[in-house]
Image: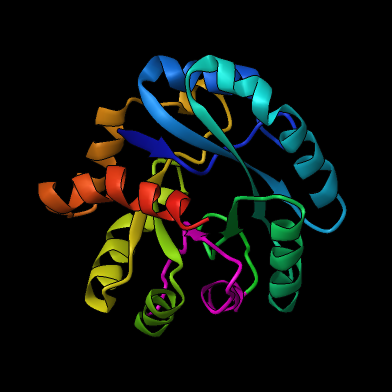
Amino acid sequence: MTYDLHMHSTFSDGELIPAEIARRYAGKGFKAVAITDHADSSNLEFILRCLRGIEKELEGHGIEVVPGIELTHLPPEKIPTLAARAKKLGARVVVVHGESIAEPVARGTNLAAVTCEHVDILAHPGFITLEEAELAREQGVFLELTSRRGHCLTNGHVARVAQEAKAELIVCTDAHSPEDIITPEELMEIVRGAGISKKYSEIITSVNPKRLLGRL
C-alpha cells in the first residue's frame, strides 16, 4: 500500500484538477493521496474550502483523497499561526515548504516547521541540521524525501541526518503535472537511492504515511 501526501492541483500551480489526480494515482495503484496546494494567507481558505467541498465526490475513484495544504515561502514567524488556521479549516495534512537549495526559501523556515505542533511534513528540507532533525523527531514532524527535480538533490543528506537523529522520514512526489506521477516501485527507488535499506524503505513508503494519516 503506497501513499503520496504532497502534490499540487489547479488550485495553485499544478496542471491537473483533483478528479484527474485521483484517477491517475488510482491507476498507478496508490492507496491514498493528499492534495497540498501552495498557500499563504491570501488563498488558504479558498483552497481548503474547495478541497473539502469535493472530498466525498473523489471517493468514487477508489482512492482516498485527503485535503491538505503546503505553506509556501512564508516568513518563518507566520508558520505557527497559519498552520493552526489550516487545521481549523479542515486540512488533514499540513506541509511546510522547506529550505530547498532549489529556491530562495527564508532561513529559519525549517526550524519554525519542526517546532510547530500543527505541521505534519517538512518538505524538501535541503541541508537540514541535526538539531532541526532532532526537534522534528520530538514534535512528530515527518521529513520528506522527494522525487521532485531540484529539491531531490539533498535527499541523501536528509536521509543521513534523519537516521542519525532518529527522525521519521516520508517520501512524496511533489507532483505538479502528469509526468511527475510515478509508480509505487519508482517511489521506492527514490528512497533506496538516498541510501536507505530495503526494509526501512518499505516502512517509509507504506507504514509511515499510514501512521501519519492515522493520527489525524
In-front residue for pair 143/85: 85
Asked whether residue 119 is drawn in magenta, I would say: yes
User: How far across and down, in percent of the image, does residue 99 sit?
Assistant: 54, 65
Task: Specify the color scheme.
Answer: rainbow
Residue in the image at 41% along x and 70% along y:
127
| Total count of labels | 0
Q: What type of secondary structure mainly makes up the magenta span?
A: loop
50 relative to 32 in the view: left or right:
right
Tell me if residue 30 can be seen: yes
Residue 16 visible somewhere in the drawing: no
For image coordinates 46% across by 22% down, the residue present is 25
Q: Residue 17, how many percent across, how many down? A: 68, 22
- Residue 110, relative to residue 27: is it above or below? below
Residue 168 found in image quarter: bottom left
Question: Where does the image place residue 74, in percent across and percent down from the top left?
Answer: 73, 66
Taking 88 as reference, is 27 left or right?
left
Residue drawn at (69%, 74%), measured in percent from left and top?
80
Residue 87 within the segment the image draws in magenta = no
- Magenta span of residues: 107-129
Q: Is residue 50 above or below residue 216?
A: above
Picture coordinates of residue 145 (x, y %)? 37, 52
Identify the image quadrant of residue 52.
top right
Looking at this view, name the residue that lies furthest to the bottom. Answer: 131
Quadrant where the N terminus lies? top left
Residue occupying image coordinates x 38% and y 27% = 30
